[in-house]
Amino acid sequence: MESVIAGLLKDFEDGKMTRRQLIQSLALAAVAAAPGPSALAQTAAAAPKPPIPQTFEPTGWKTVWLDHISFQVSDYRRSAAFYRDLMGWTIRNDNGTSQATLNINGLGGIIIRNGRAPNAQATAAAAQPAAGGAAAPAAGAQGAAVATGRH
């Protein structure tokens, strides 16, 4: 890289290129030398990932049949911890940023990935006190959590 820059500067000093051409060439050389997305991903993948924390004591439930499921959630780590602790499924892979794959007792797998925005309407409704003074969940919020994989 140093020899490329030295050659560009020599060409500029010898009058073989304009200042604008020199700057464009230096910028192009800098972009070419920068690590690409795959190199950055490999660096990020090499960093150790903290384990997903336990949310509650395991229930002892056992899944007896299920092929595969894929959920899109607002917090994949929280959802992965929920299913691991509730159903006894093991975390097979956690990329540390957006997705975890769980093993369903050797019967299949579940992929939980980020991508769903939190439900603002349900969050606002839960924050407002009900007539009795307690916070009331939004209508159908509990069923929606099960159906969409949100907790």
Image: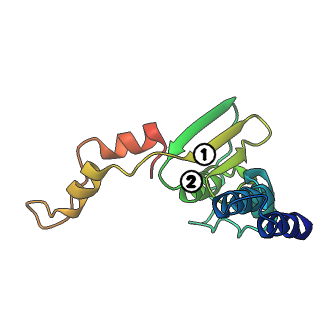
Q: Mark 2 points at which residue?
A: 76
Q: Mark 1 points at which residue?
A: 112
The foreground one among 51 and 63 is 51
In the image, is 6 to the left or to the right of 15? right
Estimate the x, y position of residue 42 in percent, counting from the top left: 81, 57
Q: Element type at marker 1?
A: strand
Q: Quadrant of the N terminus?
A: bottom right
The image quarter containing residue 32 is bottom right
Color encoding of the figure: rainbow
Q: Residue furthest front?
A: 15
Q: Element type at marker 2?
A: helix
- Name the kind of residue labelled 1 in the image: Ile
The foreground one among 66 and 25 is 25
In the image, is 9 to the left or to the right of 56? right
- Name the kind of residue labelled 2 in the image: Tyr
From this viewpoint, is residue 7 visible? yes
